[in-house]
């Protein structure tokens, strides 16, 4: 069942086209990661899907409804975690949840039971009376996830949920999201962490300068775009592009050289022949695909 | 007198019944322990003290009977607390999503420093103006008191309203409202009502001036309570007008300072519209008529302070309040398209 369906969606801010004719569809129960450099249009697209921003062109359906024309109806079925820690600092943990719960008519015994369940789920039990100002960055993100789940949404929109968090906290949040996926939750995740997308996403779409340049499962994208192995080393030790094994693909980025090939043995042999010190031979990752497709220069 | 009792008693009775019903429903829904411990009960001691002091104070003042103070304290505090808590529970039940916005705004006003700073300035300035007017003119008149309160309001209101949208936008908390299933109109009206609750709490102590005037003018006769009631109505209406104007200013920018400056400019322009008409010699033309009509204090508040409730003045304040609320909603919506 298709829960999100976009056809040629375009959004402009003045002269800047933030989202350019994007078409994508998302099935129920999957985790879809929107990857892209800063300013690629991920947040704008996510906000349009959440009914927060209108589109200038194209068709959008979220759970069969137009998210802009039927904002309240669509929002009632969505849980949203935005990029900023949008918590009311004047209120404590429980009061933040209580106010948000009322938006969804959640109160009384049903509210208390749901809050107890969610705080346990995001490991915040016992912190109900804590002022939100006193929470750490990781706790705030977990509280935001709990708040987004209060209404038992059909779709969870996560806009860069782990940006600025340390690796341990990121792992905790990934574990939380995996548990949600096991329960069949549909998740749309925007991120610029490739590892996050590799760990969580069933499907990945790469946005660049407002355009969806490719999409597919992480494995599909890697196989479709680049050979499966990559050898990475310092450019000062490079014997020159002409000397690489036949059929290999060479990329330069800063002072690093990347040689891609499906034949790992050929790469090992070539390495032995040229005596390169401190090489790094590894499997091609989503990050290599991302950099290949969006370019290695700064997008500012 | 009978009509006065009916006029005050019927709506009052309905509010009391609604309150008791709301409280009953909350206790039934949440159980006695949880219902009584609801966060809104935090306001109960404050409500009890304010209402009790007010009702008891009136009794003490008029009848000079200390026992009445105690009776008034209990008689005023208990039903008012019940009514407030019950109404809170009832609104929670009838329209929780909208009421959640109102509560959020009210909490924000009572838990951030700027509104308290505004309250402090308001009380100091009105107190000083009251004292200066009384000392300077020796005139025992409610009109002068509330005129000075109104003139201070115009200066302080932008401080109260500048952050309503601008601060939320700057801090990102506006996302909470934008992603919740509530319309922009509901958010705007909730911000308006939340600020009005704070304003009413700010205005309430001004009534003390009336009792001081009663005491001061004891020998020459008590001031007529009629103008006090009409003046309070006028103050509530002009408060709504200022809040909606400030809300609009806050909706068009992300800078609190810019929002405050814009609100001041708009208010000053409106307040000076009558002198502007006189300076340009257009007082008796249609342009002058419009400019004079737009003057909120001279033309429309003044009758309330004299004890005259003219429906045209009520319509002026209400229509401008609705107009600025409408502009605020349009401003919020139009920003999403830009």
Image (cartoon, rainbow, N blue to C red):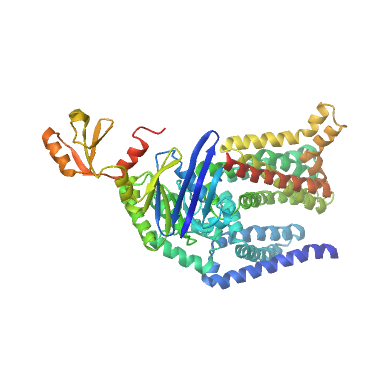
Query: Dividing the picture into quarters, in which one does residue B333 lie?
Result: top right
The C terminus of chain B lies in quadrant: top right
- Quick check: A83 left or right of B138? left
At a point 35% along the width and 32% down the height, the residue shown is A297
- Quick check: B322 left or right of A224? right
- Quick check: B132 left or right of A137? right
Residue A221 visible here: yes
Q: Residue furthest right?
A: B284
At a point 18% along the width and 37% down the height, the residue shown is A279
B285 or A42, nearer to the observer:
A42
**Residue A71: horizontal and vertical position, in percent?**
57, 53
Residue B127 visible here: no
At a point 53% along the width and 67% down the height, the residue shown is A108
B186 or A248, nearer to the observer:
A248
- Quick check: B4 left or right of A69? right
The N terminus of chain B lies in quadrant: bottom right
**Residue A66: horizontal and vertical position, in percent?**
56, 53
């Amino acid at each position: 069942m298709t829960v999100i369906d976009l056809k040629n969606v375009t959004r402009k801010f003045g002269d800047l086209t933030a989202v350019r004719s994007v078409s994508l569809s998302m099935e129920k129960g999957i985790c879809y990661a929107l990857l892209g450099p800063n300013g690629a249009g991920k947040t704008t697209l996510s906000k349009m899907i959440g009914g927060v921003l209108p589109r200038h062109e194209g068709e959008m359906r979220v759970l069969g409804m137009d998210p802009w024309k039927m904002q309240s109806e669509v929002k009632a079925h969505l849980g949203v975690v935005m990029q900023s820690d949008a918590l009311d600092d004047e209120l404590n943990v429980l009061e933040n949840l209580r106010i948000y719960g009322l938006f969804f008519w959640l109160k009384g015994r049903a509210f208390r039971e749901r809050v107890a369940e969610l705080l346990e789920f995001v490991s915040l039990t016992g912190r109900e009376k804590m002022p939100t100002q006193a929470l750490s960055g990781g706790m705030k993100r977990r509280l935001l996830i709990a708040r987004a789940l209060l209404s038992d949404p059909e779709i969870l929109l996560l806009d860069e949920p782990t940006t600025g968090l340390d690796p341990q906290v990121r792992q905790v949040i990934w574990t939380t999201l995996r548990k949600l996926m096991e329960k069949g939750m549909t998740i749309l995740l925007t991120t610029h962490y490739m590892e996050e997308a590799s760990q969580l996403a069933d499907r990945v779409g790469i946005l660049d300068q407002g355009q969806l340049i490719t999409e597919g499962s992480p494995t599909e994208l890697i196989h479709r775009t680049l050979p499966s192995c990559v050898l990475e080393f310092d450019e000062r030790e490079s014997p020159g592009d002409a000397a690489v094994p036949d059929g290999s693909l060479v990329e330069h980025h800063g002072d690093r050289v990347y040689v891609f090939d499906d034949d790992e043995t050929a790469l090992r042999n070539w390495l032995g022949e040229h005596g390169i010190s401190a090489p790094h031979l590894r499997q091609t990752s989503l990050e290599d695909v991302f950099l290949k497709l969006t370019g290695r220069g700064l997008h500012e | 007198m009978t009509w006065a009792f009916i006029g005050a008693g019927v709506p009052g009775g309905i509010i009391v019944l609604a309150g008791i019903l709301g409280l009953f429903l909350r206790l039934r829904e949440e159980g006695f322990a949880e219902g009584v411990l609801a966060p809104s009960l935090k306001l109960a001691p404050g409500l009890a003290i304010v209402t009790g002091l007010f009702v008891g104070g009136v009794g003490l003042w008029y009848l000079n009977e200390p026992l009445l103070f105690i009776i008034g304290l209990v008689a005023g505090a208990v039903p008012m607390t019940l009514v407030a808590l019950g109404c809170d529970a009832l609104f929670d039940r009838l329209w929780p999503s909208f009421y959640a916005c109102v509560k959020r705004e009210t909490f924000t006003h009572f838990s951030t420093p700027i509104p308290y700073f505004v309250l402090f300035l308001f009380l100091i300035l009105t107190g000083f103006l009251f004292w200066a007017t009384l000392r300077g003119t020796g005139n025992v008149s409610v009109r002068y008191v509330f005129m000075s309160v109104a003139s201070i309001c115009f200066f302080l209101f932008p401080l109260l309203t500048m952050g309503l949208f601008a601060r939320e936008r700057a801090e990102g908390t506006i996302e909470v409202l934008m992603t919740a299933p509530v319309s922009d109109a509901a958010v705007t009206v909730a911000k308006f009502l939340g600020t009005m609750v704070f304003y009413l709490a700010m205005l309430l102590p001004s009534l003390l001036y009336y009792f001081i005037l009663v005491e001061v003018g004891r020998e020459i006769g008590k001031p007529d309570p009629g103008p006090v009631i009409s003046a309070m109505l006028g103050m509530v209406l002009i408060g709504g007008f200022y809040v909606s104007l400030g809300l609009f200013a806050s909706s068009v920018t992300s800078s609190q300072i810019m929002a405050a400056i814009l609100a001041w400019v708009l208010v000053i322009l409106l307040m000076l519209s009558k002198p502007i008409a006189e300076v340009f010699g257009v007082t008796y033309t249609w342009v002058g008529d419009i400019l004079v009509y737009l003057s909120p204090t001279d033309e429309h508040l003044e009758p309330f302070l004299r004890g005259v409730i003219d429906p045209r003045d009520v319509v002026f304040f209400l229509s401008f309040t609705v107009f600025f609320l409408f502009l605020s909603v349009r401003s919020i919506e139009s920003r999403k398209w830009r």
